[in-house]
Amino acid sequence: MLRFLIRRVLSATLVLFAISVLTFLMFFALPRDPVTSMCPKNCNPARLERVRAELGLSDPLYQQYAGYMKGIVLGRDLNSAEGGHCAAPCLGYSYINSEPVSRTIARVLPVTLSIVIPAAVLWLALGVGLGMVSALRRGSVLDRLAIGFSLTGASLQIYFVGAVLLLVFTYTLHLVPVPHYTSITQNPADWASGLVLAWVTLAFLFSAIYARLSRAQMLETLSEDFIRTARSKGLPKFRVYGQHALRAAITPIVTIAGMDIGGALGGTVVTETTFGIQGLGRTTWDAVREGDLPTLMATVLIAAVFIVVANIVVDIVYAFIDPRVRLG
Amino acid sequence: MSLSPVEDIALSEFSPGTVAEPAAPGSGFVGRSPGQLAWARLRRDRVAMVSGGVLVFFFLVALAAPLIQWAYGTDPQQQFQDSLDLYGMPLGYAGGVTGSHWFGLEPSLGRDIFIRMVYGLRTSLFIALAAGVITTVIGVLAGVLAGYAGGWLDAVIGWVTDFALAMPFLIVALALVPTVSLRFYGPREAVPSSFRVAVLITVFALFGWTSAARLVRGQVVSLREREFIEAARASGVSTAHMLFRQVLPNIWAPILVSFSLAVPSYVTGEAVLSFLGVGIVDPTPDFGAMIFRSIHYLQTDPTYVFFPGVTIFILVLAFNLFGDAVRDALDPRSNR
Amino acid sequence: MRPRVAVAAGSAIVLFAALGACGKNTGQGTATDNNRTTTGVIATDPKDSMGPAAPVPGATKGGTFYVLRQPKINHLDPQRVYSFAGLSAAPLYSRFLTTWKDDGKGHLTLVGDLATTPGKDVKGDCTTWQFTIKDGVKFEDGSPITSKEIAYGIARSFDPDLTGGPTYLQEWLANTPEYDTAWDFKANKTSLPPGLTTPDAKTLVFTFQKPHCDLPFAASLPFTAPMPPAKDTGVNYDNQPFSSGPYKITKIVPGVQMVLERNTNWDPATDPVRHQYPDSFVWSYGADATAEANRIISDSGPDASAISWDGVPSTLTAAVAGNASLKDRTLLEPTPSANRLTINMQRVTDLSIRQALNYAIDRDDLIKALGGATVASPLTTLMPPATLGYQQYDAYPAGPNGNPEKAKQLLNGRTPELVLGVADDDQDTQIGTQVKNNLEKAGFKITVKTIPQDSKLDETKKKNNPWDLYIDTWGADWPSGASILPPLFDGRTIKDEGNSDTSFMNDSAINAEFDRILAMPPAQQGPEWAKLDKRIMTQDAPAVPLYVDVAFYLHGSKAGGLFIGSVFGYPEFVNAFVKP
């Protein structure tokens, strides 16, 4: 177990390192010069060059990269305008937002967490619930409705469902307030009502997979010998389905949930754009558009951390749920 | 950012152990291969037949686009701005639906929606199918290699898979799509739409192969320990024979399903790229771009949203249903 | 698994059916008033520069005024403000040397803001300008504003770190575009740039080596806002500007909101234009233009006292303009932002081809493609109608749909192959399609070349750019021909990159005209610029004038006192109030 963990963590670190190099190179390949946007009319090349030097963008690439990475690992000294010494993990200073990147992240990360985590709970509950019900009532009207509902979800797009929901529930019926973010510690009711449309949209689209998956797994498991044994032993239905069958059916669900949640935590740019909420995804997108390298590096790395950590967690969870899986 | 959750489904609906055993030669009553059996099951499945029929219809429409244009008599680039009001909205009923413009006119440019949808279907289906084929091929190769060879090769491929999963899709698409065309075409040369299509397919290929690779690897790992493989190994057949005659025939079912589920995810993925501004651009007719553009007219020209929206919905739904049906047919155990 | 396709498809159809029962569109609608022109003077009577500003009819104190906008304002630091949103917000929290008294109907008067008059031309040759600072003007902490703080503000605009702002004063004072090498702010923080002096706490003097008659206009831009040196936090000043206006910034959450509350140390008796009606202003970011418009239409809660800064999106105009109940909640005015199809004269050297392009253009259909009369209004002149002294003319009369036959005649059987550069975003590529189809009807062969959106501006401003045609927009910094024609067409300014003269026109006779008119007193320049405009179009045809942007805004039923500024064409907040 420990050996496995060490190996996975090492490999994940290497992934993050490669991602950071790639993002860095990619930034400079983008067809824009972050400096030119800084002098709108009457610009001249000589002054652009001075601004570029001032921002440290004219140093050789490897030097800029090394400086950035050193900041994350050891901290580094920024110039006084950027707030002086920046302790590890230093994510740098964004000239576009006029603030240290760590402050931007501290602000937008809770937003994305608030969108994704409740949505994930909702889509898992909805999806697995629908799947279980239709497996147990196989062939019934309920089964067809549940699967039809989930397939409809899987065949639609976020911005489409989002636009329709907004139009109907917010602008026309005034049932749901305009999407916004309030911290849960400040006002839980406002937090929930501001994000509920985003949760419902994500849940509707994502639950399909879980419904289909849990239905198939459930059907498969129900026909296994040990379930039949349990039933014939006279164990109550509830215990058989709830404990034995679900437990066996849950492994693949965990895999997909891990990947989905990990990916979504890295930013739900389409959702955030549709509902006008500034989370990690929107911030990454703005950073690309505005040529904001420090912010971009930070958001991309955080997204990557979520994905690799989710993968490791899935492997560990596997070992716990399914005794047949051995980590080695 | 994952392109679409749909593609992952195939991964886990095939837990190792659901692979059909190869039919023992000469033991059958009628001697039908698993493929023939699956086909027979598929033909009895009404949903499969309907969704399959819908797909065939869409493919035919896409293929016959020039023919349809000839019969319909309108060019996809032709503008009918005289039929627009001063806000650029189509005159008349329901977004300008008339006998000569079956689905009405686009607001602003006033082009015919029907003929642009026909051509858009062509672009979108081509991108999705090509991306689907490429990602499946790469995924199968990577998966078979990793699963069969094991050891360091498995570790390396596993790492690359992790890397591709964690790669910032957005940044890559944004950096790649405009930059590549600058590199290949002169500053005064128009970039042909086929090139942009190729770039999009490449972007999808870079990101999309991982789920197929993981799926296939899992299958191969479990096959490796089976008796018939061990038997073949003991009889000293070549690696190529082993892979192509023993391993691949046993995993084509999940591959096919993963393919049929990946294709619709590229159709919608392409619409997301348009949403982010790196998809297919005007004047090339394209479904993704059309959906993205039309959604803004939800309140002022619902007809413009309706036709492309319903069409892409039916297309994706048909793919999903057909994919399910194929899986059911190939793997009867999951659907008793 | 046996789902019914019909179940799913049926649900989708119900969904759509609910979206809209369609009526017949017969093409009724209101058009924009295109005849609005601007008249403007520089105040000669010092009384014009005195406060308080005339009360706004019906205005009441109190309430919170909301401004909805998608992206945050990129800079709040007055020395860096140059975006339209920044230019509208800045007067709330800062005051300048001069400012425009604007009735929102095109009648402008330039008055002194912190200064008692809009500047005194000491020698009568526009080289020495003197300003006297008003009594009783204070910062938000109650400390007095003197000429020293204004001079410090101008001095810090020389700092190359403080990017983004206009550069007129710096270049005029240093007498070179390389002003930041001519005078290094960081090394001379306690002194002032060359030519800028403060003989006493009430007096500020600009001494230029060349005449700059436009100084009073330029001084109305936010970079003349005062700043005490002790409050200067360099690039971080964007997050905490120190207020001299009627409101002070009390909270900024980047990308989410900005809150301004009353500044009790602002004295209305000193201010000729600003009011202090609402208790606070809140700029709230994030929602896109469609969401903003829908919120305002709903008119519920805080949105009732809000304006959507991003305007009514062209995709929604039909619904908004066609809705009579929204009529008194809209603002609809043409703006001074002029769009032209620039012809790269280095490549298209043949005048008859440039003239043929002018005859061929179909402005009517182009405007339809842009979203109609509430988005754009046709333009046949280089200067927009909102320029002082404007005169309407059409050097190549071809009617609203263009005259392809006339163009073909001029082309005389030739088929010029031209490359049109457009940004690769959705809107611009559609316009590319529109222009291509339009011009090809007149015998041109057009290749549409997409340029990555983020670099399109930089690339077309390069001297040796490879394209023949591209669409450019010019929003002048003050409504005088002096800030339109010379920057756009003075060939002596052409450099390797960053050109505003993107036609790369260099006509020595016209250049001489620029010098002659620029040396005239501003009040007499107006008609001269209008004449020169026509002369440039007739003689050189360096561009095809296309359209001016039209401002079309929606506000809530409780938002009052809003108008479209005559200088920039964006909503102004100096009169804003919340109806009870």
Image (cartoon, coloured by chain):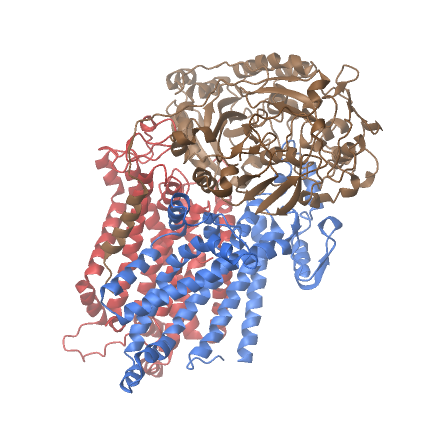
Left or right: A83 in relation to C104: right
Residue reaching furthest to the right? C199
* Colour assignment, chain A: blue
Q: Is residue C347 above or below residue A54?
A: above
**Looking at the colours in the rendered structure, which chain would you say is drawn in brown?**
C
- Residue drawn 27% across the image and 38% down it: B103
Q: Nearer the viewer, residue C318 or A299?
A: C318
Residue B19 in sight here: no
Q: Is residue A268 above or below residue A243?
A: above
Residue B238 rendering spot, x and y as whole percentages? 36, 76
Q: Is residue C39 above or below residue A186?
A: above
Q: Nearer the viewer, residue C225 or C416?
A: C225
- Residue drawn 53% across the image and 67% down it: A309
Residue B117 rendering spot, x and y as whole percentages? 30, 42
Locate residue B146: give its quadrant.
bottom left
* Colour assignment, chain B: red
Locate residue C216: give its quadrant.
top right
Left or right: C106 in relation to C32: right
Q: How many marks?
A: 0
Residue B241 rendering spot, x and y as whole percentages? 33, 73
Q: Is residue B303 above or below residue C445?
A: below
Quadrant location, the N terminus of chain C: bottom left
Residue A46 rendering spot, x and y as whole percentages? 70, 37
